[in-house]
Amino acid sequence: MSDPAHTPAKLPFALYLFDIDGTLVNAGGAGRRAFERAVADHYGPVKPTLDGLRLDGLTDRLIARKALEALGQPFDETFCDDLLERYVEHLHAEIDGPGYAVLPGVFEVLEALRARGGLVGLCTGNVETGARLKLRRGGLDRYFDWGGSAVFGFGADGEEREKLVLAALRRAAARLGGPVPPRSALVIGDTPRDVAAAHHAGCTVLGVATGRCSVAELRACGADHVAATLEHPEALRVLLG
């Protein structure tokens, strides 16, 4: 790894990959509302397409697929791209709605990682523009490098969440000039899908119960470490040593 600015000697991991929804922020249902509006743009007023569907841990492309299935429509890649563009357009307005919150301990953890030279990235099912909007709303976008050397896994990298983790590891290797052993990366997420995807890639997982899953549920699905929030002492021990 040839980037000395991102070879932190005093951190337990070389790479930190954060989920967004339920881990860094609670978007207050903005994503669901934006998807519903995007579907309505094409099909007119319909029964809420995502009713009863748990979106936790799903990529945006998979949400689009499930929305089309609920309407009895065939999946088409070009149409999916258009639906996601409409979704982002609506998210610009919906993200300013009520209920948005940065979750406990997030600012403190990101500040500490930045101060100690940690390489911080994203592993999120959001498309990139949606991720930017959700983070910018809470003032979190400044903690992430959005340039060409960004270490991100986005929803555009595939419907299956494990593809996002693998994409982020590849980008970290390109940035650092050498392979990144998966066990040197920590994935931080709030759902069993985060856990399964990280383990598929060989990464360690910190599960945080700031979404809809409890500490017990995250532990039961195999998370290596579990904490109630990012400000919990166990989370700080895992993240910062």
Image: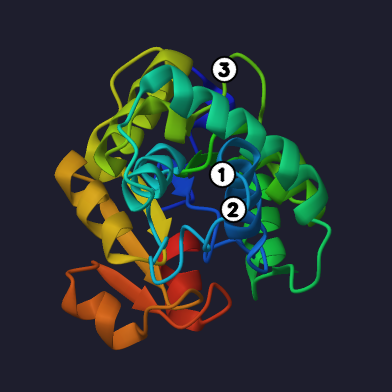
Q: Which residue is mark 3?
A: 149
The secondary element bearing badge 2 is classed as helix
- Whichever of callouts 3 and 2 sits on the residue coming sooner in the sequence is 2
Residue at (33% x, 37% y) in the render: 165
- Mark 3, secondary structure of its residue: loop
Badge 1 or badge 3: first in the primary sequence: 1
Mark pair 3, 2: CA separation:
34 Å
Nearest the eye: 162 or 237: 162
Alpha carbon separation for disc pair 1 and 3 = 34 Å
Which residue in the structure is indicated by mark 2? 36
In-image side of 40 versus 174 (left or right): right
Name the residue type under label 2. Answer: Glu
Tell me what residue is drawn at x 83 percent, y 58 percent: 96
How crowded pointer 1 is (Cα within 10 Å; few <14, some 14-19, many 20+) is rated as many
Q: Which circle, 3 or 2, is nearer the viewer? A: 2
**Residue 109 in view:** yes
Q: Is residue 179 left or right of residue 3?
A: left
Residue 48: x and y, percent? 53, 62
Query: How many neighbours does mark 2 have within 10 angstroms: few (below 14), some (14-19), or many (20 or more)?
Result: many
User: Tag 1: residue type?
Assistant: Val
Residues marked 1 and 3 touching at CB (< 8 Å): no
Q: Would you identify the image quadrant in which residue 189 lies?
A: bottom left
Question: In what quadrant of the picture does the N terminus appear?
Answer: top left
Q: Give percent across and percent down for residue 174.
A: 41, 14
Specify the quadrant of the image occupied by residue 106. Answer: bottom right
Q: What residue is shown at x 26% (from left), y 48% (from top)?
A: 198
Q: Is 210 situated above or below 125?
A: below
Q: Which residue is mark 1?
A: 39
Query: Are the residues tagged 2 and 1 within 8 Å (C-beta)?
Result: yes
Mark drawn on residue 3: none
